[in-house]
Image (spheres, grey):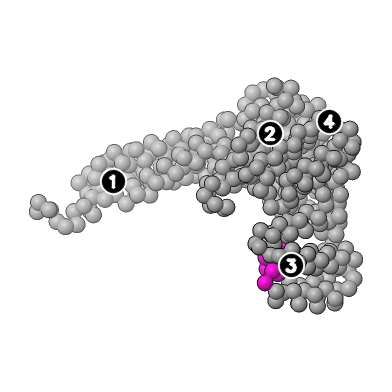
Amino acid sequence: MGGLPINSLARRRNPLLWVALPASVTSLFLAVETVSALGVVVDLASVATLGGILAAVCAAMALRRSLRNPERYGSGFGPALALLLALGAMGLGLREKFFVCRQEEVRFANGDVSLAGTLFLPPSAGPHPAVVVVHGSGRETRKSDYSFYARLLARHGVAGLAYDKRGAGASGGDTYGTDYAGYAQDAFAAVRMLRERPDIDPLRVGILGISEGEWVGLIAATSEPAVSFLAVFSACGTTPAKQVAAEMEAKLRARGHSEETIQRALALNEQVYAYQRTGREGNMLVSALQAARVEPWFRDAEDIPDEVYAPEEYNWWRSVMDFDPAPLWERVRVPVLVIKGGRDPKYPAEEMRRNIETALRRGGNNSYRIIILPGADHPLLEWPLGKGVPPPVFAAGHPEALVSWVRERVGFD
C-alpha cells in the first residue's frame, strides 16, 4: 500500500456525501416524474422539494468539510455535484407546486358542514373552466390522486378543485353521517363556490368522479343544471351491493375455487345482506358464519364479515347499498366520459360498459365516450414489475384522454 496506513481510505471518506448524493439523485428523479403515474400515489412535487432540501443541507455540509480538510474528506467534486442536483430537485419541485399552476386554499359550506380544499389554477388570467374532483369511498382527503388530477387539469388550462371529504382532513362533518345525496350536495357546494368566483367561467364547470364518485357525481349532475359535463373513473353502473358481490366472486374465481364453492359464498353473502337490510334473523347468520369460517374459501372471500354486529352499525351501508345508478344514467343530459381499467377487480369492465351504455341510450344521451384500458387496475395504473411493485405506469392513452376530452368540452380544442 506504499506505506500508507491501512485505514487511510476510510479516513478520506465523507459520510455525508453518501447521504447527499443518493438523496439528490432520487429527489431530482421524482421532480422530473411529477406528472407520471407515481404522482397518483404520492405528491411527488412535495417529496422532491423536501428531499432536495435534505440533500442540499447534507451536500453543503459535506462540501464544507471537503474544502476545509481535503486530505481527510477528499475532493469537493462529489459534494458539489450532489449540491447542484439537490438544488435542481428543489427548483423543479417548487416550480411544479407554485409556478406551473397556482394553488389556493379554499373553504366552502354545505349547510352547517364546512369543507376545505385546494384550488389549482392555470397561470394565465381567467375566467377558466373548472372541474371538481369527487372522492372514492372512505374518509378521503384531497391528497394523492385527487390533487394529482386537479393539478394536471390546471397544467392544461382547466382549474381543478380537490377537497377533503366531510369528516376527513380539514373538513367538518361526519363522513358516515349522510348518504350519497349528502356527498352530492357537498360536491355541488364546491361547484357553486367556483361559479361565484370571477376567475372561473360559471358556464363551464364539470365534475370528475372517482370510483364511489360515480354515484355521487351522478346525483350532482342530474339534480343541478349548473354542472356542464361529467367524467367518471372506475365506475360499475350498478348498486354498491352488487359491486361488492361481483368483486368477491372475481376474487374466489381468481384463486381457483370451484363454481359450487363460489355459489355457496355468494349465497352466504346474500344472507349477510338480508340481515344488514332488515336486522332480522341475526342468530341464523351467526350460525352460518361460524360454519363457514372453518372452510378454506372463507378468507379468500374477504368481504364476508367474521361476526355479526348490531343492526344500527349498518346504518350508513344500508342507506347506500341498494343505490341503483341506472335511472340517473338515463337522466344525464350533459356530455359524459367514462374510463375503466380492464383489470379492475372491483367490477367487470365490459359489464360496466353494458350497464352504463344501455342506460345512456335509453335516456337518449348520445354525447358520451366509454374507454376501457385493457391492462389497468382500479386506479387506472399498470404494474410492469408485478402488482403493487413500484413504479406503476399509466395505461396507454391515460390520462391524456381525460385532458383532451375535458378541453374539447370547454371549447379549447
Q: Is residue 108 visible?
A: no
Callout 3: helix, strand or loop? Answer: helix
Q: Which one is earlier in the sequence, the residue at label 3 or at label 4?
A: 3
Tag in front: 1 or 2: 2
Callout 4: helix, strand or loop? Answer: loop
Estimate the spatial distance between the alpha carbons at disc 2 and disc 4, rounded to whole Å: 18 Å
Residue matched to label 3: 261
Q: Residue furthest left?
A: 3
Q: Position of residue 41 (x, y in %)?
A: 59, 47
Residue matched to label 4: 366
Query: Disc 2, disc 4: CB below 8 Å?
Result: no
Tag in front: 4 or 1: 4
* 310 part of magenta stretch: no
- Residue 228 left/right relative to 45: right
Q: Position of residue 250 (x, y in %)?
A: 71, 57
Q: Which residues are magenta?
A: 296-305
Residue matched to label 2: 402
Check the picture and name the quadrant holding the C terminus: top right
Residue matched to label 1: 65
Tag in front: 2 or 3: 3
Q: Which one is earlier in the sequence, the residue at label 2 or at label 4?
A: 4
Q: Residue furthest front?
A: 259
